[in-house]
Amino acid sequence: MKKLYFLKHHKIRTIIIIGIMVVICFVQNSTAQTKDEIAVADLLRQNAAAIEKSDLASLDKIWSDDESVTIFESGYADYGWTNYRDKHLTPELKEFKNLKYSFSDIKVNTAGKTSWATLKYTLSADVGSRHVDSAGLGTAILEKRGKNWRIVHLHTSAGF
């Protein structure tokens, strides 16, 4: 009888311990994903801040430095980070005065070494003799390269 009582309680303890271990593993996985989501959202905000400051050195650390990078802006396409930086972004930033650029409502998802985010953006600047205000939506795709997230694709379109 004692043996049966011991076995019954031993099984219950084993089930409880396994249940606790499953919960701990789930919480640890959620925490790791949350850290990545926070890192990606922060990196996207850093990207907007670096553009606002015309800080190309910081942008070089945020974007993946290869030809597979794609940037779609309001119906136009750029391929490769260096091409976009040198032929599109740099001339554009030289024209902008009093630039204000930001991302908001960033929603991030991650799966392994890939992350995607949706966002809203606002842009305000003086360009020559005119003032431009723009706002729209965007989607970003990032890859984890080593320990760091890097933007590999950004698609923005004005519209609201």
Image: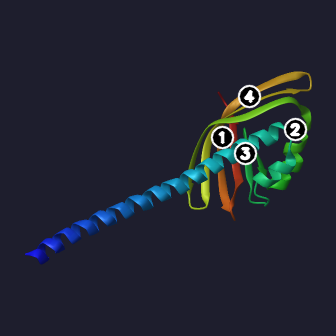
Element under label 3?
A: strand
Q: Earlier in the sequence, mark 2 or mark 4?
A: 2
Answer above or below: position of 51 versus 22.
above
Residue picked out by circle 1: 138
Q: Is residue 143 left or right of residue 5?
A: right
Residue drawn at the location 61% of the way across and 47% of the way down: 38
Closest to the observer, 36 or 19: 19
The residue at the point 72 percent across, 34 percent down is 102
Which residue lies under the disc numbered 3? 72
Q: Which of marks 1 and 3 is in front?
A: 1
Q: Mark 2 points at which residue?
A: 93
How many neighbours does mark 3 have within 10 angstroms: few (below 14), some (14-19), or many (20 or more)? some
- Residue 53's place in the image compared with 80, above or below, is above
Camera-near label (2 vs 3) is 2
Q: Which amino acid does label 1 sit on?
A: Gly
**Residue 134: mark in rendering:** 4
Of pointers 2 and 3, the one earlier in the residue sequence:
3
Q: Distance between the residues labelled 1 and 3?
A: 9 Å
